[in-house]
Amino acid sequence: MDLELKGRKAIVTGATHGIGLCIAQQLADEGAHVAICARTAANVERTVRELKAKGVNAVGDAVDVTHKEAYVGFVRSAAERLGGLDIFVSNTTGTPGRTGEEGWEACFEADILAGVRGCETALPYLKKSQSGAIVLICSISGVMSKALKAPGILAYGSCKAALIAYGAQLSKEVARDGVRVNMVSPGPIYFENGPWDFIKQRAPAAYEDALEHCVIGRLGRPEDIASAVVFLASPKSGFTVGQNLQVDGGYMEHIAF
């Protein structure tokens, strides 16, 4: 299927490993030009080189999305360097593990404020596109009533729930401006040095429990999420607005009406 992404311009945050990296790679494979950011300069430089090798334009900066001025500046600069913007993928996330108010503040900054700031900064550019799209990377933790047994998971899940609500409400505001907003909520996703690799090593019982609940018989891979994101961001998904797509291998047990 031709997703009609050749020549489109996209920003993907947190894009040097795991889900974000796969999203950037799949967009580039479809012929889209990509701007990325992450916290480590060497990783950004390496990823930009890899993306350029696919025959597209790629730019990137080392940015901490919790630093407002630097992050807003990156989004604006990236859109200018790309020559416009058609797709914005917010892949920023807090890290479960911090407890107390520090954990709540960290998740609020990384999940909610980074998502809001990124969208608000990108929207003036996206409204000039013929097919503007925002995809927010959320989590099934945002819709689960039973929290996993991990420090800081309550803050993480609550902030992801707020991000889902924000995206759904924003989608109604900007659809008439030609910008579609959707969310993707991953289930347990395994990749080397990722959160579920850590859980596998440190809490094997929790890993096995997740494996059992993924009725498809395995944990997810970053590519599983990237494929869903790239489709939602493409003109081929042009009638999809305000949806939260759960890509979880059957982990969730509720019936989503």
Image: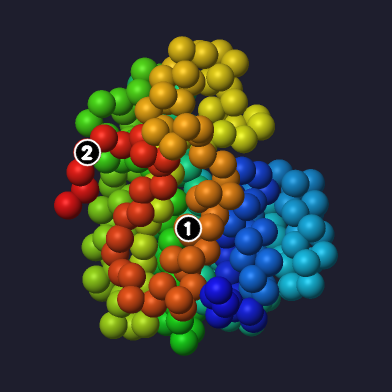
Q: Is residue 244 above or below residue 125?
A: above
Q: State the residue in front, 121 or 198.
A: 198
Q: Is residue 251 above or below residue 243?
A: above
Total count of labels: 2
Q: State the residue in front, 156 or 146.
A: 146
Q: Of marks 2 and 1, which one's residue comes earlier in the chain?
A: 1
Q: Is residue 192 above or below residue 12?
A: above
Residue depicted at 37% across the width and 72% down the height: 180
Q: Is residue 143 visible?
A: yes
Colouring rule applied to residues:
rainbow
Image x and y of residue 127, in percent? 42, 82
Q: Amino acid at mark 2?
A: His
Residue depicted at 52% across the width and 14% down the height: 204
Residue depicted at 74% across the width and 73% down the height: 57
Image x and y of residue 12, in percent? 57, 59
Image x and y of residue 47, in percent? 75, 54
| Quarter occupied by residue 56 | bottom right
Q: Secondary structure at mark 2?
A: loop
Label 2: how many Cα within 10 Å (few below 14, some 14–19, many 20+): few
Residue depicted at 29% across the width and 56% down the height: 166
**Quadrant of the drawing holding the N terminus:** bottom right
> In the orientation shown, which residue stands out farthest toward the left?
257
Tag on residue 254?
A: 2
| Quarter occupied by residue 133 | bottom left
Q: Amino acid at mark 1?
A: Ala
Looking at the image, residue 18 sits to the left or right of residue 176; the answer is right
Q: Is residue 89 visible?
A: no
Residue for badge 1: 228
Image x and y of residue 64, in percent? 59, 47
Q: State the residue in front, 166 or 24.
A: 24
Q: Secondary structure at mark 1?
A: helix
